[in-house]
């Protein structure tokens, strides 16, 4: 993943984790811009990439477990994740070129 895309993802995650909790004790909802950005990335990703990223990044499934579920070697899971992350970075880079100036 190119450094600037990785940094943007990390900054967004950090900001989201620092969000003020709501009355129910949950973090505040992500900004409308972040939600639209995430929807755009998901819409542009192939379904297989999104599923792989979801299992590992959102659900926290270890690569070895996912490899067993898919019936592929663990190295294949790593390769597919690397490719999926690279596609996310490319999409984010394209979207950042289209983003309105602040």
Image (cartoon, rainbow, N blue to C red):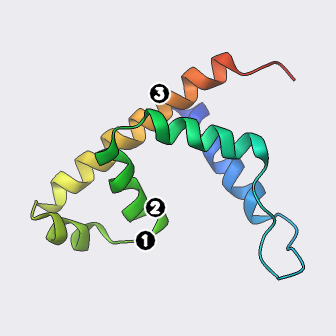
**Residue named by callout 3:** 90
**Residue named by callout 1:** 60
Mark 2 secondary-structure assignment: helix
Q: How crowded is mark 1: few (under 14 residues within 10 Å), some or many (20 or more)?
A: few
Above/below status of 3 relative to 21: above
Q: Which of marks 2 and 3 is nearer the N terminus?
A: 2
Q: How crowded is mark 3: few (under 14 residues within 10 Å), some or many (20 or more)?
A: some
Residue 24: image location, x then y, percent: 83, 82
Report the residue at 26% width, 53% height from top: 78
Contact between marks 2 and 1 (CB within 8 A): the answer is: yes
Q: Residues within 10 Å of mark 2 (few under 14, many from 20)?
A: few
Residue 68: image location, x then y, percent: 15, 71
**Residue named by callout 2:** 57
Mark 3 secondary-structure assignment: helix
Side (left or right) of 28 relative to 23: left
Q: Quick one: quadrant of the C terminus?
A: top right
Report the residue at 82% width, 82% height from top: 25
Residue 44: image location, x then y, percent: 45, 32
Q: Distance between the residues labelled 3 and 1?
A: 23 Å
Residue 39: image location, x then y, percent: 57, 42
Q: Is residue 14 visible?
A: yes
Contact between marks 2 and 3 (CB within 8 A): the answer is: no
Above/below status of 94 relative to 70: above
Q: Earlier in the sequence, mark 3 or mark 1?
A: 1
Mark 1 secondary-structure assignment: loop
Quadrant of residue 47 in the image?
top left
Mark seen at residue 93: none
* Nearer-the-camera pick, 14 or 37: 37
Side (left or right) of 57 relative to 14: left
Above/below status of 81 relative to 63: above
């Amino acid at each position: 993943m190119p450094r600037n895309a990785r940094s943007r993802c990390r900054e967004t995650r950090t900001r989201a984790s620092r969000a003020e909790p709501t009355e129910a004790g949950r973090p505040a909802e992500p900004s409308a811009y972040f939600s639209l950005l995430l929807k755009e990335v998901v819409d542009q990703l192939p379904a297989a990439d999104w599923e792989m990223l979801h299992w590992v990044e959102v659900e926290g499934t270890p690569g070895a477990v996912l490899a067993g579920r898919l019936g592929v070697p663990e190295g294949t899971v790593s390769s597919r994740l690397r490719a999926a992350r690279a596609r996310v970075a490319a999409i984010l880079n394209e979207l950042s070129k289209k983003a309105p100036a602040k």
